[in-house]
Image (spheres, helix red, strand yellow):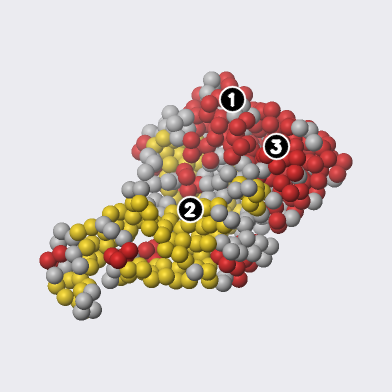
Amino acid sequence: MSKYKVTVVIVNYNKEPYISQCIESVINQSLQPIEIIIVDDGSTDNSGIISSRYAAAHPHIRYLTQENNGVSSARNKGLSYAQGEYVAFLDADDYVSADAYERLYKAAVQSDADTAVGNFECFNEYRTWHLAYMKKVFAKGLPAVRHISTHKELHLTPSASNKLFKKDLLIQHSISFDEDLHVGEDLLFTQKSLYCSRKTVVENSDVLYYRVNDNEMTLSKNSTLSFFKQLVMVQQKVKSLYGTLNERSLLHEIEKRQAEFFFNSLFTKGPKLPKNHLNELLDISSSFLDTLVHREVTSSLDSKSQLLTQMIVQRDYEEFMNLMFSFCKDESINEVFLEEGLFYSSLAKTFPRYKQYLEVKHVEVEQRIEVIELKDGQLTLGGYAFIKGLSAQGMQKDLLFKYRGKEKAVSLQQDLRTDVSYIFSHNQIDYQDAGFKTISLNVLDFLKQGEWQVYIRLTVNDVTVEEPIKVMLAQLRNRTKAHVVNNIQIKTAFNTRSQMTISLKKSKHAGKIKVFCCSSKKRCPI
């Protein structure tokens, strides 16, 4: 039997301002006993002194030191001393909630799971936020106990710090951090751990508070060729892992995520590199594409990334350089335009030879319902809607109802919204006509009985785009209560994506319900 339920390996490198908060968050855990191993990776500030004082005062804290050799080496050193049943990893500038390890440990033990995954909250000095992709990990309807081979959403959480790993699992499969990696080291470790794990249990609660410090000088935040070489190396090693496991089909989700990250990094870090490094960057980018087993994942990327892909494939150094150093900084990169009934990225105007790759097949509609009410048979609705990247000037809007192949439409009047242009494009794109005036519609006069799906339809230059109406706020949905008018029950429903349906059907309990009498404008029993 293990001496400790959990061992927490904390890696520290010059985190003097944060190290105390990190250590104390683990000392004060509701789960006991916990072993704490602090590994100092060659710090030059006072964080090592602070750590050693905690170790001297607490018998369950061990303090280890090494020359600066990176987080992977430091974690492996801590892992080699760990005595806990499960192991957790924590960076010294982050901290954990008071019951983090109790939640994860109990979930793991109750499910007999080798690995446990929790959520985390990012923060800086201005705000806190959750990462959007983690919503897929904790989506409703998914089982608590899963395996990465059958639940692709587990590929979306590469961090080692929001998880527990059974020590016996790591020993049995010789799982450790790859010390050649200084970027993306978590990905390889968690992929192997989650695959080798018999069961992974998911605990939907914030266990980790992850500090985002943009001022740090780390390889992952610097603009260097080494950063991109590391990303290629990570992908090669992940590819090799799944090749050894004979599970290359599982690489699809990983490669999609990594390709998106690689190209986003090209656009944010590439322009900061010296121009004489761009030729080598093009070579590195080509090597990255060569690592992809599922090259088609690049077709799901945004327009500028698909353009970049083609430039890399064609070894078009001149245009690659132009995109890196000039156009990628332009706000208009997000614009689209219409030509012969097709949408294209505005990049096609600057790089016409690549136009065939820049068709936008699925434009994005931005909409917001700000006013909605369903009362006494009257539907009241107002807000804004526009096609992202396309001027809203002259755009026709219709409210559309669909039921069993039938359609009913009502035109919406334009409403001036200068705020929308500012919020969504900093006035680079004209969305001033995005708004539509609040409309009030008697649904009994307009619709027959049935379950009608509600859409917003946008038309520009004879091209039409439709999208289901979405009502995101619960307080607005609450203004659409079911009621009965003239023996007809009128009710709204919203699916998991907040899309709206309005149904009309004869009431089964009309005699018991007080309803609105259209003739007298009073409430009376039927």
Residue 387 drawn at (x, y percent): 57, 56
Indicate which label's residue lies in the foreground, 2 or 1.
2
Residue 186 visible in the displayed image: no
Residue 499 is left or right of residue 492, and the answer is right
Disc 1 crowd rating (10 Å Cα; few below 14, some 14-19, many 20+) is some
Disc 3 crowd rating (10 Å Cα; few below 14, some 14-19, many 20+) is many
Q: How many marks?
A: 3
For the residues bearing labels 2 and 3, Cβ distance under 8 angstroms: no
Q: Amino acid at mark 2?
A: Glu
Element at badge 3? helix
Q: Is residue 238 above or below residue 468?
A: above
Disc 2 crowd rating (10 Å Cα; few below 14, some 14-19, many 20+) is some
Element at badge 2? strand
Cα separation, mark 1 vs mark 3, equals: 25 Å
Q: Which residue is mark 2?
A: 466
Indicate which label's residue lies in the foreground, 1 or 3.
3
Residue 168 drawn at (x, y percent): 48, 28
Residue 494 is left or right of residue 346, and the answer is left
Q: Quadrant of residue 297?
A: top right
Q: Which residue is mark 1?
A: 241
Cα separation, mark 2 vs mark 3, equals: 30 Å
Q: Residue at x 48, y 39 (%)?
A: 153
Q: Amino acid at mark 1?
A: Leu
